[in-house]
Image (cartoon, rainbow, N blue to C red):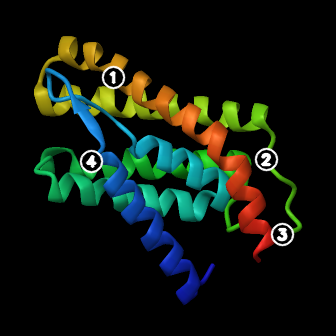
């Protein structure tokens, strides 16, 4: 698929939203944090599909790590969050940006996709924490913060995605 200027603009906007939303966070001991970045990833992946959601999540999460001083996680975030966005988008809206003829995504399908994305993210960051921190115990303890962040993302996406789907498709 060849990206058009419009596609690059959407991906850049999603990446910027993801990076900014990740700054809305609560830091916890052990290097973990609870943030709103997952809410943006979940919502935009459902609304715009796997290509936009995956690339926006990968770039935005890596950008946050780069600018926020978390460079030890930059590569991990790019891969983990990118795959998370791609998975959620593929399981809901598909690979490319959905058209106005694509049916709206149902709540049960959204929940299933976000559970898959959250499990992937928790597993990926477990491995990242274990590698970076060097302690399987700390990595295991930090999983709870990944789950809390994903739960926050669930709530926001369940509320926002249906509304944004209708708005986006009406204006196409």
Q: Earlier in the sequence, mark 1 or mark 2?
A: 2
Q: Earlier in the sequence, mark 2 or mark 3?
A: 3
Whole-percent x, y for residue 168 in the image: 71, 66
Whole-percent x, y for residue 76 in the image: 29, 45
Spatial separation of the CA atoms under disc 4 and disc 1: 15 Å
Q: How many marks?
A: 4
Identified at 22% across, 28% down, the residue is 32
Whole-percent x, y for residue 15 in the image: 40, 63
For the residue carrying disc 2, how many other residues have a C-alpha within 10 Å: few (<14), some (14-19), or many (20+)?
Answer: some
Q: Secondary structure at mark 3?
A: loop
Identified at 73% across, 63% down, the residue is 167
Q: Earlier in the sequence, mark 4 or mark 2?
A: 4
In this rendering, the answer to whether 15 lies above or below 159 is below
For the residue carrying disc 1, how many other residues have a C-alpha within 10 Å: few (<14), some (14-19), or many (20+)?
Answer: some
Spatial separation of the CA atoms under disc 4 and disc 2: 28 Å
Q: Earlier in the sequence, mark 4 or mark 1?
A: 4
Q: Which residue is mark 1?
A: 145
Q: Secondary structure at mark 2?
A: loop
């Amino acid at each position: 698929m060849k990206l058009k200027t419009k596609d690059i603009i959407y991906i850049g906007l999603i990446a910027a939203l993801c990076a900014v939303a990740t700054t809305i966070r609560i830091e916890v001991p052990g290097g973990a944090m609870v943030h709103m970045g997952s809410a943006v990833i979940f919502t935009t992946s459902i609304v715009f599909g796997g290509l936009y959601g995956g690339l926006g999540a990968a770039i935005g999460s890596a950008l946050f790590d780069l600018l926020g001083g978390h460079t030890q996680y930059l590569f991990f975030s790019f891969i983990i969050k990118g795959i998370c966005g791609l998975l959620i988008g593929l399981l809901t809206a598909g690979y490319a940006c959905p058209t106005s003829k694509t049916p709206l995504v149902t709540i049960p399908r959204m929940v299933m996709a976000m559970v898959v994305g959250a499990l992937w993210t928790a597993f990926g960051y477990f491995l990242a924490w274990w590698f970076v921190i060097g302690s399987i115990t700390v990595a295991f303890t930090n999983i709870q913060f990944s789950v809390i962040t994903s739960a926050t993302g669930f709530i926001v996406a369940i509320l926002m995605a249906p509304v944004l789907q209708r708005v986006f498709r009406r204006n196409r």
